[in-house]
Image: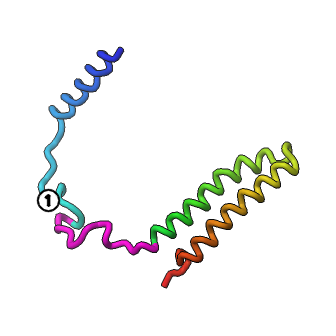
């Protein structure tokens, strides 16, 4: 099976090499029709955006846990409610930390 898989990958690679069209030099150059970048891509973003991204991920993960919780909360009762308040307390702690670090300041 491994030999068949290796042969299939090699065959597809060779087929690609045989039928691929060489890209035009102007299209294969970097950003904005081939203009060379003036600075490194990561240097354009201020560090505060990373804190804002972490804050967004905290809320995104919160939603991942809240949707299944909403489905089973009626079955589990008060235990599920207590667990959700503990979880929201952790998320609230993350929001307070982000606020203290200035992630919510946009100026």
Check disc 1 and report its element: helix, strand or loop: helix
The range drawn in magenta is 33-48
Q: Residue furthest right?
A: 78
- Residue 50 in the image: x percent, y percent? 46, 67
Please state which of residues 6 and 88 is positioned toward the viewer in this rendering. 88
The part of the image, by quadrant, that contains residue 42 is bottom left
Q: Residue furthest bottom?
A: 107
Residue at which label 1 appears: 26
Relative horizontal placement of residue 69, taking residue 40 as reference (left or right): right
Relative horizontal placement of residue 50, taking residue 63 as reference (left or right): left
- Residue 43 in the image: x percent, y percent? 31, 71
The part of the image, by quadrant, that contains residue 62 is bottom right
- Residue 86 in the image: x percent, y percent? 75, 58
Question: In this rendering, is residue 84 above or below 37?
Answer: above
Q: Residue at x 14, y 59 (%)?
A: 26
Please state which of residues 23 and 36 is positioned toward the viewer in this rendering. 36
Q: Residue at x 23, y 24 (%)?
A: 11
Quarter containing the N terminus: top left
């Amino acid at each position: 099976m491994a030999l068949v898989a290796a042969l299939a990958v090699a065959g597809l690679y060779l087929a690609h090499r045989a039928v691929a069209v060489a890209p035009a030099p102007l299209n294969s150059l970097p950003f904005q029709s081939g203009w060379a970048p003036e600075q490194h891509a990561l240097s354009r973003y201020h560090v505060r955006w990373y804190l804002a991204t972490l804050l967004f991920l905290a809320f995104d993960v919160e939603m991942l846990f809240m949707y299944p919780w909403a489905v089973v909360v009626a079955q589990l009762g008060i235990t599920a409610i207590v667990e959700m308040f503990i979880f929201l307390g952790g998320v609230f702690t993350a929001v307070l930390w982000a606020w203290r670090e200035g992630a919510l300041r946009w100026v």
